[in-house]
Amino acid sequence: MLRGMRKASSNWIGKTIMAVVMGVLIVSFGIWGIADAFKGYGQSKLATIGSTEITTEQFRQLYNDKLQQIGRQFGRPLTSDQARAFGLDRQVLQQVVAEAALDEDARRKGLGVADAEVMRQIIADPNFQSPTGGFDAPRFQQLIRSLGFTEQRYIAEQRKVSLRRQIAGTVTSGVEPPKTMIEALSRYQNETRTVDYVKLDAAQAGTIEAPSPEALAAYFDERKTQFRAPEYRKIAFLALTPDEMAKWSTVSDDDARKVFEERKDKLSTPEQRQISQIVFPNVADAEAGRARLNDTFKFEDLAKERGLSASDIDLGMVAKAGIIDPAVADAAFSLAPDGISQPITGRFGVTLVKVGKVQAGTTPSYDSVAANLKRDIAIERARAIVSDMHNKIEDERGGGANVVDTAKKLGLTAVTIEAVDRSGRTPDGQPVAGLPTGVDVVTQAFNSDVGVDNDALQAGGGYIWYDVLGVTPARDRTLDEVKPQVEARWREEQITTRLRDKAVDMAKKLESGAKLADEAATAGLKVVTSAPFKRDASDPALSAGVIQSVFRGVKDSAGQAQGATPSEWIVYRITDVTAPAVDMASEDAKKLKETLQRGLTDEQVAQYVTRLETQIGTKINAEAVAIATGAANSNTN
């Protein structure tokens, strides 16, 4: 369960280090709960964990950040009611309390982390690496902004994360899964089985006579709901996005060349340099280290002497803009290849920088980027058109016009779907073509009604307006309307029943000592020998149900199970069961050990956090939580 909850929480935090480190701690509250810690007090203070306070405003900001992140992922805003239905309020509360408990623990233990270490962790974070390797400062800024952080706030938060890592690492030090557990699970996962089997299909079911009118009517009456016509809706929508509007625009070469000259620096590939750095706590140590460098005592030797590996000091091939510290960037890009700087007093400490290989920058020709440039210009122009047209459409709709009439008046094209069900299919069962991408218009229409003035949906940097023009209620169909489908379903069930009975009978004979080859010959079937397969195998010839059934038996036992379709049954005998020896040095065993170790360390950290809550003392203001998440307003309404 811990693993499942951690996987669920990772969906909304994504690739940030914080989620990876703190996901376990979120889980701990989900397991042991914090409901008994709720006590009412001032609404400005949402929680206290020891002497650490979480204000209502701090929690509200984090909660709103999460709402916005999820909204961006889904392509539309998430309401407070929807967020609470998903349990987001509980998850965020669990997160902030867990983090505060560890922060309080770090404070009481007097733990700290150097600025240089924080910088090293940020630069080494693979989420901030460019496609060619090395720290990518623009990517760093873009990603942290998308997560609701400023640079200063992210660095401060990363410092806290580093301290939480220290605590978690200490708590879980030495935790390893027992060898016996690894061996048992490895044998379970890697055990293989081989079967001889025959496949029964519709041909073995014999002739299926057509049902009498009375029998068919009785069959239909018992299953009438299965043939029920769903509710259909007639809807119209008008999509207005920059991509669509850009098709109406043409861009001249003169305009494109002008923009090319303005954006030449951005279109160009900047000079990149192989940068290595060593960070010192003060100028004196940096000067002493720099003075020792010579032909026999290299920069790398100095790093090794200070306990740093090659990956600790290597920033990779980076552009000047990709170095987070401006002072270091200026010094690194003023050196000649293979040059080593004098001590640099920067943002995170005193640094020595070495430059390795230098890759010159490049500037593309106009012709090589003209097509993309014209498209970008057209889209930029279209955004202004979309904004202006949005206001006109809203004015028309404010006056009572529906989507179709509005589109006609403004020279636009609305799409009308005569009938669609909740699954996006027409009455003939085919998916509706031409629906907008990035937003579920059909679901929105089924959440609305005829005559309702719906808010425009945001998609692709533009808007989609929609109306429900009519509703055809769900109803029971008559037998005459669906007679072919009913007859086909009746026939399928007859075949399935006959095949199942034949398979059960054959399997009983095998268990009583009959040979599969003899039974197959009598039925005119061919015996097939499978390749060895594991319990998690995916074999097109053997369905998942057959494989599960095989692994419930023992060697030489027989059985039967449904094949890939209801009109296919498999009868088998297990001919071999092999449990391979466990090689603890194999990659599979190592991966299994890592998986088990993660589970054990998760449990260990979770228990530690729970103990912290008890020892430090945790109080939650339920009323403040309700106000911050909008639950109080919802209850009032």
Image: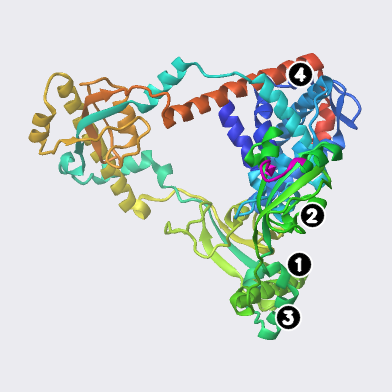
The residue range painted magenta reads: 292-299
Label annotation for residue 258: 3
| Residue 335 place in picture, x, y as percent | 75, 57
Q: Which of pointers 3 and 1 indicates the residue nearer the eye?
A: 3
The reply to whether discs 4 and 1 touch (Cβ–Cβ < 8 Å) is no
Check the picture and name the quadrant holding the N terminus.
top right
Q: Which of pointers 4 and 1 indicates the residue nearer the eye?
A: 4
Q: Which of pointers 2 and 4 indicates the residue nearer the eye?
A: 2
- Could you tell me the amino acid type at mark 1? Glu
Q: Which of the two discs, 3 and 1, labels the residue nearer the N terminus?
A: 3
The reply to whether discs 4 and 3 touch (Cβ–Cβ < 8 Å) is no
Which element carries disc 4, helix, strand or loop? helix
Q: Whole-Å distance between the Cαs marked 4 and 3?
A: 62 Å
Q: Whole-Å distance between the Cαs marked 2 and 1?
A: 55 Å
- Could you tell me the amino acid type at mark 2? Ala
Relative to 549, say whether 374 is above or below.
Answer: below
Which element carries disc 3, helix, strand or loop? helix
User: Which of the colour schemes (rainbow, by chain, secondary structure, one colour) is used?
Assistant: rainbow
| Residue 175 place in picture, x, y as percent | 59, 18
Label annotation for residue 394: 1
